[in-house]
Image (cartoon, grey):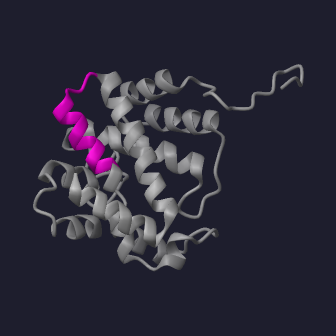
Amino acid sequence: HPAAMVSLIQMRRFDPNLASHGVDTGMLAMAIGQEHGCDPPQLKLVGLAALLHDIGQLRLPLNLIRKVQIFTHEEHKLMQAHCEMGVAVLNQFPDIPDESKRFILEHHERLDGSGYPKGLRGHHISELTQILSIADTYDAQISGRCSFPPVPPARALSELYRAAVQGQYHLYLVQRLIQLLGVYPIGSLVRLNTDEQ
């Protein structure tokens, strides 16, 4: 997809971590979608959206993107604007499907209404948006994005599962991710109760 490749190059020049997060989230989202039974056109839409979901961050200050301390309230509000900014950037490319733009706009919405930018709830958030949200949240947690330190994969899965039980994510889709990765993905360091590793 030419527009996606150009956008990804721009993201990599701005911040290499932003581009790699998009690629990783794209692979995870398509894997979850395939596990869920999405058809190839749906996988293409969610994969494209996942690849570009944070492109709106190109319009934010780089020092905000790379900040390692907890965001202030004002910084958090500014960061939240990246969803709408992303759609504004992608509106320059008529070959980006509207469905993918919608997933990008809504990738921080949560089923319980606690997300942003519109506070959507329940059935107002599509399953494909949910797939993108889950993949994004997992990768952001294990890679340490948005002023938070990285966490081990098992902990990230546990926190995602807990959030799904509390109503933020579709539990079935989180279970698909856990089934894909396993509770202890390859490369995880596990300490047994005997202190063996």
The secondary structure that most of the magenta stretch takes on is helix
Residue plotted at (27% across, 50% down): 49
Asked whether residue 139 is drawn in magenta, I would say no
Residue 78 is situated, as x and y percent measured from the top left of the image, at 40, 75
Rendered image quadrant of residue 35: top left
Residue plotted at (40% across, 76% down): 60
Asked whether residue 44 is drawn in magenta, I would say yes
Residue 69 is situated, as x and y percent measured from the top left of the image, at 64, 70
- Reply above or below: 127 against 8: above
Residue positioned most to the left = 94
Q: Nearer the viewer, residue 74 or 197?
A: 197
Residue 61 is situated, as x and y percent measured from the top left of the image, at 45, 80
- Reply above or below: 36 against 105: above
Rendered image quadrant of residue 47: top left
Residue 115 is situated, as x and y percent measured from the top left of the image, at 36, 54
Rendered image quadrant of residue 25: top left
Residue plotted at (19% across, 26% down): 39
Image mark count: 0
Q: Give the left or right position of residue 4, taking residue 185 as reference.
A: left
User: Magenta segment range?
Assistant: 37-50
Q: Give the left or right position of residue 9, taking residue 119 as reference.
A: right
Viewer can see residue 93: yes
Q: Nearer the viewer, residue 186 or 153?
A: 186
Viewer can see residue 122: no
Residue plotted at (19% across, 44% down): 124
Residue positioned most to the right = 195
Q: Give the left or right position of residue 63, taking residue 81 as reference.
A: right
For the C terminus, the quadrant is top right
